[in-house]
Image: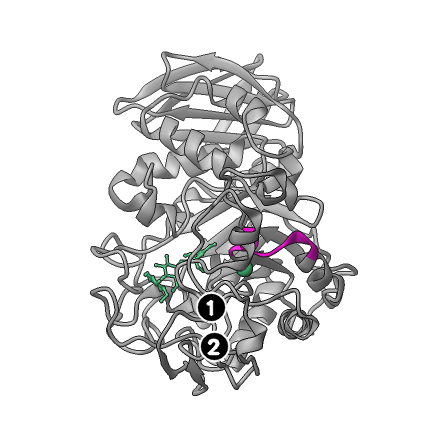
């Protein structure tokens, strides 16, 4: 099987929310690899509940967040063979696969048959396919009432989801074995769903048993979902950073809202001073599948080009590991992916390089960002230095002498002239095209006597860096 160095590409993650495995594989080869993505976050691969009708939807997207067993065959996104083939193809394309891991809980109440045919009884706390029995669940069998009390946050139920007793060694072993099965297939990282609801000490022993990723020479990358609320440090994002990275929701709140409202000028200071954890401990996003539905500041749905600008800004600024959102159109919160209404959700072939990406189905936001994921790789941890502003909604900044980016969060064109520390020469605008261009390409941008001159359309962006320079014109 393929072996690639972990840092062959950058660290930028794209979340292909609800994409089928075969579609993810194609995207890795055709789009993600060539445009500099380092990783793809895929939807949860374990066996899940199957709900023909719930909360007004047929087969809601959130079936995936209710685990029935750790079998990965026959989820709504494909077979185990499809999954393995996807991991292989993505690795060969230089793109790591990160799986969303549902390990805090199993299902809600009720009973039924899971996607891979396993029976489950939420009412009896019984999941024979794992197997888990009632003693494997915490004794607090009601929803979390006091969100400031770690005992409740860790050991009571979130949304009535049966809460695994991770203080039990056999439960931790089941979880470690599940994650190791994925690692052995080449999965290189995990989003730990609801990590805040698992004691850090239990997660630490779960992680301690993880295999190295084949060919990577190290353990998987772990980023933990820890929403910041009240209570003591043990249930704050920084209570989990000793174990791995965390999702920093402050970034979404600050940057998403400000870009939506055309307030760019304070943002470089905000990401420098006002985030929850250190830059190299955070995964950041403008929106995710939850905020799109429950805490909207900005998303592609309704914001289009302004949302693209926000995600481009995230890739240009220095804080955190950026996670790009790529989502789908919906009219109802629980609605599954396009072409839904069947058990499989999005049937084979529903999404290809040439069909399926439009404003009525999959948005494919990431494709609008072109080769922008090459930017953070090129500039590294070089700080941002503001160079030009025009009002509050137009901003240009350098990343040392390695990159320059400009943003026009207005509805009119901006004729920009800005100083930059980039060496004089010609560059390829990676926000608007591929990293490879020629000096007569439309995206070729010249720095002359320390100055960039360009016109940014309404909601336009521009980004150039030292690793994307033109080859000779053909
Ligand atoms: C997460 N991160 O910590 C996920 O990002 C989030 O999407 C998950 O909720 C949540 N934690 C649990 O993994 C989603 C939906 C919920 C859904 C839940 C389980 O946002 O709406 O709950 O997944 O499928 C649904 C119903 C609830 C019901 C529950 C159990 O909406 O009313 O209590 O199922 O039956
Ligand atoms: Ca828990």
Mark 1 Cβ inside 8 Å of ligand 1: no
**Looking at the image, which residue is at 57% across and 52% down?**
151
Q: Which image quarter is the N terminus in?
A: bottom right
Residue 92 included in the magenta stretch of the image: no
Q: Quadrant of residue 272?
A: top right
User: Foreground: 286 or 81?
Assistant: 286
Which region of the structure is painted magenta?
194-201
Q: Is residue 113 visible?
A: yes
User: Foreground: 13 or 427?
Assistant: 13
Q: Is residue 442 visible?
A: no
Which residue has dot 2 on it? Answer: 125
Relative to 246, residue 98 above or below: below
Helix, strand or loop under label 2: loop
Instruction: Please state the horizontal and vertical placement of residue 129, each as a whole percent of the image.
Output: 53, 85
> In the image, is 76 to the left or to the right of 463?
left
Rendering quadrant holding ligand 1 = bottom left
Question: What colouring style does the render use?
Answer: one colour
Helix, strand or loop under label 1: loop
């Amino acid at each position: 099987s393929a072996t690639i160095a972990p840092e062959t590409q950058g660290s930028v993650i794209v979340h292909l929310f609800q994409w089928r495995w075969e579609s993810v594989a194609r995207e890795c080869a055709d789009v993600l690899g060539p445009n500099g993505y380092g990783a793809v976050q895929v939807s949860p691969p374990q066996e899940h509940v199957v709900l023909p009708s719930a909360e007004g939807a047929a087969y809601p997207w959130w079936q995936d967040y209710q685990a029935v067993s750790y079998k990965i065959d026959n989820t709504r996104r494909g077979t185990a063979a499809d999954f393995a083939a996807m991991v292989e193809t993505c690795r060969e394309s230089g793109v790591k696969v990160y799986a969303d891991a549902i390990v805090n809980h199993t299902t809600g109440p009720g009973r039924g048959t899971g996607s891979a045919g396993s029976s489950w009884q939420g009412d009896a706390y019984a999941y024979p396919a794992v197997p888990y029995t009632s003693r494997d669940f915490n004794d607090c069998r009601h929803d979390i009432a006091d969100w400031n009390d770690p005992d409740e946050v860790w050991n009571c139920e979130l949304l009535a989801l049966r809460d695994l007793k991770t203080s039990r060694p056999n439960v931790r072993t089941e979880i470690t074995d599940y994650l190791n099965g994925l690692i052995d297939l080449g999965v290189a990282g995990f989003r730990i769903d609801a990590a805040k609801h698992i004691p850090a000490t239990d997660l630490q022993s779960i992680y301690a048993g993880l295999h190295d990723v084949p060919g990577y020479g190290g353990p998987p990358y772990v980023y933990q979902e820890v929403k910041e609320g009240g209570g003591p440090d043990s249930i704050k994002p920084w209570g989990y950073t000793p174990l791995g990275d965390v999702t920093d929701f402050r970034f979404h709140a600050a940057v998403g809202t400000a870009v939506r409202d055309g307030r760019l000028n304070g943002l470089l200071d905000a990401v420098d001073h006002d985030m929850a954890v250190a830059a190299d401990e955070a995964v950041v996003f403008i929106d995710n599948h939850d905020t799109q539905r429950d805490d909207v500041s900005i998303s592609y749905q309704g914001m289009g080009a302004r949302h693209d600008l926000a995600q481009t800004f995230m890739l240009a600024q220095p804080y955190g590991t950026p996670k790009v959102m790529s989502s789908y159109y919906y009219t109802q919160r629980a609605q599954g992916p396009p072409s839904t209404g069947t058990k499989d959700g999005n049937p084979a072939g529903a999404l290809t390089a040439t069909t399926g990406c439009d404003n009525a189905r999959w948005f494919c936001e990431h494709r609008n960002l072109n080769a922008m994921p090459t930017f953070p790789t090129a500039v590294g941890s070089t700080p941002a230095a503001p160079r030009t502003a025009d009002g509050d909604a137009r901003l240009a900044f350098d990343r040392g002498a390695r990159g320059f980016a400009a943003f026009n969060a207005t509805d009119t064109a901006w004729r920009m002239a800005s100083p930059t520390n980039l060496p004089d020469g010609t560059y390829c605008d990676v926000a608007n095209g591929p990293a490879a261009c020629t000096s007569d390409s439309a995206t070729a941008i010249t720095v002359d006597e320390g100055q960039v001159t360009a016109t940014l359309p309404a909601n336009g962006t521009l980004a150039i860096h030292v690793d994307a320079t033109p080859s000779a014109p053909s």
